[in-house]
Amino acid sequence: MRQLAGKLNRTWLAVIGIVLLLVGVLAALAATGGLGQLLGMPGTGWTAPTADSPLVDGAAAGLLAQTLAIIAVGVVGLIIGLLALGWLLAQIPRTNAARPFRLHDDATTGLTVCPPEVLATAVADEVRTYAGVNAASAVLRGTARVPELTLRVSADDRTDLRGLLTSIRTEAAQNLSTALDTPIAHLGVQLDIDRGKRTTSSVTL
Protein backbone atom coordinates (compact mmCIF):
# COMPACT_ATOMS: atom_id res chain seq x y z
CA MET A 1 0.00 0.00 0.00
CA ARG A 2 1.67 3.12 -1.19
CA GLN A 3 0.46 6.68 -1.35
CA LEU A 4 0.19 8.29 -4.76
CA ALA A 5 0.13 11.97 -5.66
CA GLY A 6 -3.54 12.09 -6.61
CA LYS A 7 -4.37 15.34 -4.81
CA LEU A 8 -1.18 16.98 -6.08
CA ASN A 9 -1.96 15.89 -9.64
CA ARG A 10 -5.46 17.35 -9.52
CA THR A 11 -4.11 20.63 -8.16
CA TRP A 12 -1.41 20.95 -10.79
CA LEU A 13 -3.78 20.01 -13.62
CA ALA A 14 -6.08 22.83 -12.50
CA VAL A 15 -3.13 25.27 -12.36
CA ILE A 16 -1.89 24.20 -15.81
CA GLY A 17 -5.39 24.60 -17.24
CA ILE A 18 -5.64 28.17 -15.91
CA VAL A 19 -2.15 29.05 -17.16
CA LEU A 20 -2.87 27.68 -20.64
CA LEU A 21 -6.13 29.64 -20.73
CA LEU A 22 -4.29 32.86 -19.87
CA VAL A 23 -1.60 32.12 -22.47
CA GLY A 24 -4.29 31.58 -25.07
CA VAL A 25 -5.95 34.89 -24.21
CA LEU A 26 -2.61 36.74 -24.41
CA ALA A 27 -1.79 35.08 -27.72
CA ALA A 28 -5.16 36.13 -29.13
CA LEU A 29 -4.60 39.70 -27.92
CA ALA A 30 -1.11 39.77 -29.44
CA ALA A 31 -2.38 38.51 -32.79
CA THR A 32 -5.23 41.05 -32.97
CA GLY A 33 -3.33 44.05 -31.65
CA GLY A 34 -5.19 44.05 -28.36
CA LEU A 35 -1.98 43.51 -26.38
CA GLY A 36 -0.67 46.91 -27.42
CA GLN A 37 -3.90 48.58 -26.38
CA LEU A 38 -3.78 46.72 -23.08
CA LEU A 39 -0.27 48.08 -22.50
CA GLY A 40 -1.41 51.61 -23.36
CA MET A 41 0.51 51.89 -26.63
CA PRO A 42 -1.17 54.13 -29.22
CA GLY A 43 -1.75 53.16 -32.80
CA THR A 44 -2.12 49.48 -32.09
CA GLY A 45 -5.77 49.03 -32.98
CA TRP A 46 -6.96 45.86 -34.64
CA THR A 47 -6.79 45.51 -38.42
CA ALA A 48 -7.71 42.57 -40.57
CA PRO A 49 -4.64 40.32 -41.07
CA THR A 50 -3.17 39.77 -44.50
CA ALA A 51 -1.13 36.95 -45.94
CA ASP A 52 2.19 38.61 -45.00
CA SER A 53 1.05 39.81 -41.54
CA PRO A 54 3.41 38.97 -38.67
CA LEU A 55 2.32 36.51 -36.04
CA VAL A 56 2.33 39.20 -33.34
CA ASP A 57 1.87 42.95 -33.63
CA GLY A 58 4.72 45.42 -33.42
CA ALA A 59 4.09 46.36 -29.81
CA ALA A 60 4.24 42.75 -28.67
CA ALA A 61 7.34 42.06 -30.75
CA GLY A 62 9.11 45.07 -29.29
CA LEU A 63 8.20 43.99 -25.79
CA LEU A 64 9.49 40.46 -26.34
CA ALA A 65 12.75 41.79 -27.83
CA GLN A 66 13.72 43.61 -24.64
CA THR A 67 16.53 42.12 -22.55
CA LEU A 68 14.40 42.10 -19.42
CA ALA A 69 11.68 40.13 -21.20
CA ILE A 70 14.23 37.57 -22.43
CA ILE A 71 15.61 37.13 -18.91
CA ALA A 72 12.08 36.83 -17.51
CA VAL A 73 11.22 34.14 -20.05
CA GLY A 74 14.38 32.23 -19.13
CA VAL A 75 13.64 32.45 -15.41
CA VAL A 76 10.05 31.34 -15.95
CA GLY A 77 11.29 28.43 -18.07
CA LEU A 78 13.74 27.40 -15.34
CA ILE A 79 11.03 27.56 -12.67
CA ILE A 80 8.67 25.52 -14.83
CA GLY A 81 11.42 22.93 -15.38
CA LEU A 82 12.08 22.61 -11.64
CA LEU A 83 8.36 22.32 -10.90
CA ALA A 84 8.00 19.66 -13.59
CA LEU A 85 10.93 17.71 -12.10
CA GLY A 86 9.40 17.94 -8.62
CA TRP A 87 6.07 16.77 -10.02
CA LEU A 88 7.71 13.75 -11.64
CA LEU A 89 9.50 12.88 -8.39
CA ALA A 90 6.18 13.15 -6.53
CA GLN A 91 4.78 10.35 -8.73
CA ILE A 92 7.07 7.82 -7.06
CA PRO A 93 4.83 5.74 -4.76
CA ARG A 94 5.73 6.09 -1.09
CA THR A 95 4.58 4.49 2.12
CA ASN A 96 5.06 7.50 4.41
CA ALA A 97 5.09 5.27 7.47
CA ALA A 98 4.80 7.06 10.78
CA ARG A 99 7.68 7.69 13.15
CA PRO A 100 7.83 5.75 16.43
CA PHE A 101 4.74 6.49 18.49
CA ARG A 102 5.26 8.09 21.88
CA LEU A 103 2.53 6.33 23.84
CA HIS A 104 3.45 7.49 27.32
CA ASP A 105 5.65 10.37 28.37
CA ASP A 106 5.83 11.13 32.04
CA ALA A 107 8.77 12.49 34.04
CA THR A 108 8.07 10.16 36.95
CA THR A 109 7.21 6.89 35.22
CA GLY A 110 9.34 7.17 32.09
CA LEU A 111 8.84 7.14 28.32
CA THR A 112 7.08 4.46 26.29
CA VAL A 113 7.78 4.34 22.54
CA CYS A 114 6.39 1.83 20.06
CA PRO A 115 7.37 1.47 16.38
CA PRO A 116 4.29 1.79 14.14
CA GLU A 117 5.32 -1.35 12.25
CA VAL A 118 4.65 -3.42 15.37
CA LEU A 119 1.08 -2.14 15.66
CA ALA A 120 0.49 -2.44 11.91
CA THR A 121 1.72 -6.04 11.92
CA ALA A 122 -0.60 -6.87 14.81
CA VAL A 123 -3.57 -5.44 12.94
CA ALA A 124 -2.65 -7.34 9.75
CA ASP A 125 -2.24 -10.57 11.70
CA GLU A 126 -5.70 -10.13 13.20
CA VAL A 127 -7.32 -9.41 9.84
CA ARG A 128 -5.72 -12.52 8.36
CA THR A 129 -7.68 -14.60 10.88
CA TYR A 130 -11.01 -13.42 9.46
CA ALA A 131 -13.01 -15.82 7.32
CA GLY A 132 -12.21 -15.60 3.63
CA VAL A 133 -9.06 -13.50 4.00
CA ASN A 134 -6.05 -14.88 2.14
CA ALA A 135 -3.54 -12.11 2.87
CA ALA A 136 -3.40 -8.75 4.61
CA SER A 137 -0.91 -5.96 5.15
CA ALA A 138 -1.18 -2.68 7.03
CA VAL A 139 0.55 0.68 7.20
CA LEU A 140 0.16 3.04 10.13
CA ARG A 141 0.67 6.76 9.52
CA GLY A 142 0.14 9.94 11.49
CA THR A 143 0.90 10.26 15.18
CA ALA A 144 -0.12 8.51 18.38
CA ARG A 145 -2.80 11.17 18.88
CA VAL A 146 -4.01 11.23 15.26
CA PRO A 147 -3.35 7.73 13.83
CA GLU A 148 -4.21 6.80 10.25
CA LEU A 149 -4.57 3.14 9.30
CA THR A 150 -4.43 1.78 5.76
CA LEU A 151 -5.11 -1.88 5.05
CA ARG A 152 -4.71 -3.99 1.94
CA VAL A 153 -6.73 -7.17 2.15
CA SER A 154 -6.87 -10.04 -0.33
CA ALA A 155 -10.10 -11.98 0.05
CA ASP A 156 -11.73 -14.95 -1.65
CA ASP A 157 -14.39 -14.08 -4.21
CA ARG A 158 -17.01 -15.91 -2.14
CA THR A 159 -16.33 -13.86 0.98
CA ASP A 160 -19.03 -11.68 2.50
CA LEU A 161 -17.28 -8.39 1.72
CA ARG A 162 -19.73 -6.25 3.66
CA GLY A 163 -19.29 -8.41 6.72
CA LEU A 164 -15.53 -8.38 6.28
CA LEU A 165 -15.41 -4.59 6.13
CA THR A 166 -17.64 -4.40 9.19
CA SER A 167 -15.30 -6.72 11.09
CA ILE A 168 -12.29 -4.64 10.09
CA ARG A 169 -13.97 -1.44 11.24
CA THR A 170 -15.52 -2.71 14.47
CA GLU A 171 -12.84 -5.21 15.55
CA ALA A 172 -9.37 -4.65 14.09
CA ALA A 173 -9.57 -0.86 13.93
CA GLN A 174 -11.33 -0.69 17.27
CA ASN A 175 -8.67 -2.85 18.91
CA LEU A 176 -5.98 -0.55 17.55
CA SER A 177 -7.92 2.46 18.81
CA THR A 178 -8.11 0.86 22.26
CA ALA A 179 -4.38 0.13 22.26
CA LEU A 180 -3.55 3.73 21.34
CA ASP A 181 -6.29 5.12 23.60
CA THR A 182 -7.49 7.42 20.80
CA PRO A 183 -9.92 7.13 17.85
CA ILE A 184 -8.57 6.24 14.42
CA ALA A 185 -8.55 9.48 12.45
CA HIS A 186 -8.66 7.77 9.05
CA LEU A 187 -9.26 4.16 8.02
CA GLY A 188 -8.60 3.09 4.45
CA VAL A 189 -9.15 -0.44 3.12
CA GLN A 190 -8.11 -1.72 -0.29
CA LEU A 191 -9.86 -4.97 -1.12
CA ASP A 192 -8.36 -7.32 -3.68
CA ILE A 193 -10.55 -10.19 -4.85
CA ASP A 194 -8.60 -13.42 -5.19
CA ARG A 195 -10.39 -15.93 -7.38
CA GLY A 196 -7.95 -18.62 -6.37
CA LYS A 197 -7.56 -21.94 -8.14
CA ARG A 198 -10.56 -23.96 -9.17
CA THR A 199 -10.44 -27.68 -9.93
CA THR A 200 -13.07 -30.04 -11.26
CA SER A 201 -11.60 -33.21 -9.79
CA SER A 202 -14.09 -33.20 -6.90
CA VAL A 203 -17.53 -31.89 -6.10
CA THR A 204 -18.78 -31.08 -2.60
CA LEU A 205 -22.50 -31.46 -1.98
Image (cartoon, grey):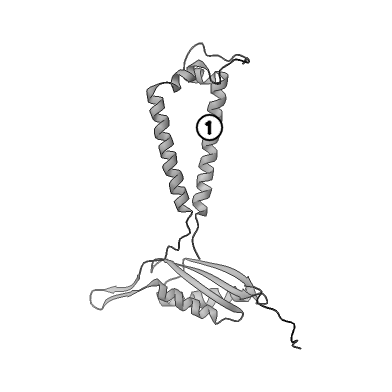
Q: Position of residue 151 (x, y in %)?
A: 52, 70
| Image vertical order of residue 21 relative to residue 86, above or below | above
Foreground residue among 55 and 46: 55
Extreme residue toward the top, this view: 43
**Which residue is at 62% across, 76% downward?**
163
Q: Position of residue 64 (x, y in %)?
A: 45, 23
Q: Is residue 65 left or right of residue 166?
A: left
Q: Is residue 80 left or right of residue 105?
A: right
Residue 134 visible in this rendered orientation of the protein = yes
| Image vertical order of residue 16 relative to residue 161, above or below | above
Foreground residue among 54 and 17: 54
* Badge 1 amino acid: Leu
Q: Position of residue 102 (x, y in %)?
A: 33, 71
| Image vertical order of residue 67 relative to residue 194, above or below | above
Residue 181 visible in this rendered orientation of the protein = no
**Which residue is at 53% across, 44% downward?**
13
Residue 146 figure quarter: bottom left
**Which residue is at 40% across, 71% downward?**
116
Extreme residue toward the left, this view: 108
Q: Position of residue 7 (x, y in %)?
A: 51, 52
Q: Is residue 145 left or right of residue 195?
A: left
Provide the residue designation for mark 1.
Answer: 22
- Number of marks present in the image shown: 1
| Image vertical order of residue 105 relative to residue 131, above or below | above
Extreme residue toward the front, this view: 201
Task: Tell me the element at label 1.
Answer: helix
Badge 1 crowding class, 10 Å Cα cut-off, few under 14, some 14 to 19, many 20 or more, is few
**Which residue is at 45% across, 78% downward?**
122
Foreground residue among 4 and 114: 4
Tell me the quadrant of the picture where the C terminus can be found: bottom right
